[in-house]
Image: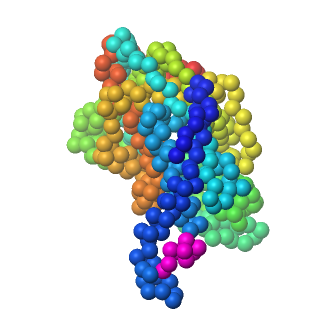
Amino acid sequence: MQVKETQNEGLKRGYEFTLPAATLAAQVDAKLKEAQPEVEMKGFRKGKVPMALLKKQFGQRIMGDAMQEAIDGALREHLEKSGDRPAIQPKIEMVNGETWKEGDDVVVTVAYEALPQIPEADLSGIELERLVVSASDEQVNEALENLAKNAQSFEDRKKGTKAKDGDQVVIDFKGMVDGVAFDGGTAEDYPLVLGSGSFIPGFEEQLVGAKAGDEVKVEVKFPEEYGAPNLAGKDAVFETTVKAVKAPKAAELDDELAKKFGAESLYALKDQIRERLEAEYKGASRQVLKRALLDKLDALVKFDLPESLVEAEAQQIAHQLYHEEHPDDHGHNHGEIAPTDEHKALAERRVRLGLLLAEIGQKAEITVSDQEMTQAVLRQARQYPGQERAFFEFIQQNPQAQQQLRAPIFEDKVVDHIVDGAKVSDKDVSKEELEKAIEALDQV
């Protein structure tokens, strides 16, 4: 195999590989000879099929395999010698593909962008500030009251009392479209909390002011994007009978409430709430700390970036932001989304930091363990109840999906490694100050 360099500008590399026809023919003959003992063909005993006939029958397919193996081997050897690491899959094209015939040399071009050499980053001088928030008694009590509200019960209001938002009404209803009842539109003794938003828009509002014993015709329109296509966008009437109106009653703040949430006592429940709040504050504080660290790393070293990686990242950012701004557009038929200069600047930052963190992690021999991957898969699988097995199989068979789970774990471990070696000072702040720091992250 002959290799000729055709481009070497910045990170862009180009080569021309020439595979001599004689070498290729020899590989084909060797493969046919290797397969000959096992070949069976009508009119010949096993292993006695003539080479000329084998070449006529299988030569073209084996020729293609031999070409691919030769090119892959040459590229591997070249990358080992040069030390290049392609940023994305190299582009390989056959120069004489349309006119090539057996007996000709095979000529292919290989083009790629090499990953840059990452300069040594001096991490010893990094100084960071960690925001520390302690859960106050007031915050614990507020969270406790919210738990009591969620554990609320309902008791009958005085006869003749009108229902209001927050009340529970017990109803029988029968839904009809064009005068015909539809499946799933009928229920008896259904407990509905007004203002909960659990029914079709407009339904609950029409029961505000109703009393026990009232019969109400609730007129609504199913949303255009409703899950049942036969009802989407249709006008409907629900013949509704209000059987009871009940007032909410918050649970008592006592040991019985604590036991409902798995604690031995109210005192123990408060401790659990305090630990949970402080864990949430710690997680939010880490976000602020991580952003501050990434800002310092971004300014620490500069190096050329592969245009292909930056372009791909900018496209992804533009696509993601488009869907955040158009949450109802779930498809991909929205035409091309051109990245802006702002998207490209953010993409450059992400690519630079990604390459730098990867380099730091590699030198520190940081890896993601099988146990950490298993935990990540289990966490992700919880988002697909009833389909966990299919999700596990998808992850096992999809290296790209595995990498998407592995990458954030690796990044967090590298960040922790850098933080452990940095000068970190703790600063006590209020919950409100921490919230402002979190809000500021979205404004950068």
Residue 87 appears left or right of 216: left
Depth check, front residue: 166 or 369: 369
Marker count (numbered): 0
Q: Quadrant of the C terminus?
A: top right
Q: Is residue 392 above or below residue 425?
A: below
Depth check, front residue: 77 or 204: 77
Residue at (45% x, 42% y) in the render: 77
Depth check, front residue: 3 or 64: 3
Residue 49, percent across and down? 48, 80
Q: Is residue 113 magenta?
A: no
Q: Main secondary structure of the magenta part?
A: helix
Residue 314, percent across and down? 63, 32
Query: In the figure, residue 120 lies in which quadrant?
Result: top left
Residue 152, percent across and down? 42, 46
Residue at (47% x, 28% y) in the render: 355
Question: Which portion, as a residue range, is magenta?
Answer: 49-57
Residue 382 appears left or right of 202: left
Residue at (42% x, 68% y) in the render: 34
Residue at (40% x, 17% y) in the render: 121
